[in-house]
Amino acid sequence: MQILKLILSILVPPVGVFLMVGINVTLLINILLTLLGWLPGAIHAVWIYSKQAERVNP
């Protein structure tokens, strides 16, 4: 499941963020970044993914 979240974070950033954090401000920020361009949204999504992975495996 983790690899799927990473792949979705790169290909469709808002979906990846939604699967990781649900509906909150982080998702809204990612949607706005993705609307500005795919790359900012993907970078933000991968960053959120890495922070979530860091919390699970300290």
Image (tube, rainbow, N blue to C red):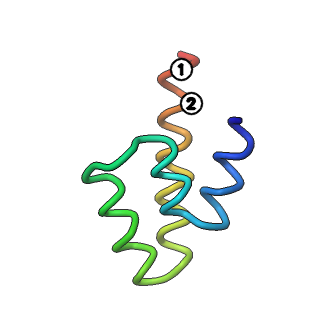
Residue at the farthest bottom position:
36
Specify whether 19 is left or right of 1. Answer: left
Q: Residue at x 60, y 56 (%)?
A: 9
Q: Which residue is mark 2?
A: 53
Q: Residue at x 48, y 72 (%)?
A: 40
Specify whether 9 is left or right of 27. Answer: right
Q: Quadrant of residue 49?
A: top right
Residue 11, image x, y percentages: 67, 67
Q: Which residue is mark 1?
A: 56
Quadrant assignment for the N terminus: top right
Between the residue at mark 2 and the residue at mark 1, the CA separation in whole angstroms equals 5 Å
What amino acid is found at the position of numbered circle 1 in the picture?
A: Val
Q: Could you say whether the residue bearing mark 2 is in a helix, strand or loop?
A: helix
Residue at the farthest top position:
58
Q: Residue at x 53, y 16 (%)?
A: 58
In-front residue for pair 23/29: 23
Residue 46, image x, y percentages: 56, 52
Residue 6, image x, y percentages: 67, 48
